[in-house]
Amino acid sequence: MLNPRGLPPGRENTSMIPDYPDSVELSIDLREKLHPMFQKLPEGVSEFTFANLYLFRREHNYRLTRMNQKCPVILGHDKGISFFMCPFGLPAQASLDTLFDTHGTLKCATISQANQLKEKGFIVTQDRDNFDYIYSRESLADLSGRKYHKKRNLIKAFINNHAYEGRPLLDEFIPQALEILDQWREPRQDDGDYHAAREALERCDPLQLCGGIYYVENKPVAYTLGEELALGTSFVIHFEKALNEYKGIYQFVNQAFATIITEHYQTINREQDLGDPGLRQAKMSYKPLGFVEKYRITR
């Protein structure tokens, strides 16, 4: 992908977004304005891409507003609890006070924002369950050393037991990826991120997501889907689905995708563990380089 060009974050034409207290739903029409702004953010917060916000807009009831005709602010509420997010920087103190008055909590605050607000007397809390896991692309591709011994064994077993093939997830293969997603959901007791994952496939082209799809004996069995972030230095995996009947398939897909994406990406962001103990253990077992830390801020 080409590096985005244009004005600094917050200076693009955002006239489609109303001033606070008015707000607007996150529509696909806003992508043209917002996507270049998100691409210029250096921190690499996985939530702060247009695609991610759009796909989870219903789950978190996202809306957009502007403070004093300046950069956009994201409003939302989870289970009746209101919050706001400031991906393009903190607004002026008066506007910030207004947001805390009406929405209570600042979510997904960066380290810089957390430090600024801590100095002003706000309560800063690490949101560990939502830290993004950051891995070396090269390490995930090579899996060298004793620390990855179990991963290599699972991948070897998968490769030795199955005739497999991987392809770029082009438009023509989207129906097969949807089949994988539907089969992934069948044994589950909850939908998880099914609806967002389905819309991601259906709107893969306008959202400019890319990924890979994998086959065993010509049967589609797994896919991965994501996009670049952190000024184009990292690739974030938004969705990775596979059929569990194939032992070692997730380890195989993890490594296979890391080997095919361009070396332009230094790291791979595999998002949060959401506080799930099993998911946290699995993500830690891949020995992350570090985390994209996020904070919740309250008065």
Image (tube, grey):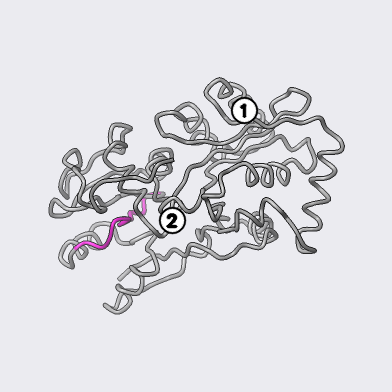
Query: Magenta region, mostly helix, strand or loop?
Result: loop
- Marks 1 and 2, how far apart at CA: 28 Å
N-terminal label among 1 and 2: 2
Whole-percent x, y for residue 290 in the image: 56, 65
Q: Secondary structure at mark 2?
A: loop
Depth check: give the residue in front, 266 or 48.
266
Q: Amino acid at mark 2?
A: Val
The structure residue drawn at horizontal position 53% and vertical position 63%, both measured from the top left corner, is: 291
Residue 90 sits inside the magenta stretch: yes
Q: Is residue 186 left or right of residue 159?
A: left
Q: Is residue 94 left or right of residue 290?
A: left
Depth check: give the residue in front, 40 or 49.
40
Report the quarter where the C terminus lies. bottom left
Q: Is residue 275 above or below residue 31?
A: below
- Which residue in the protein does label 1 denote? 182
Report the quarter where the N terminus lies. top left
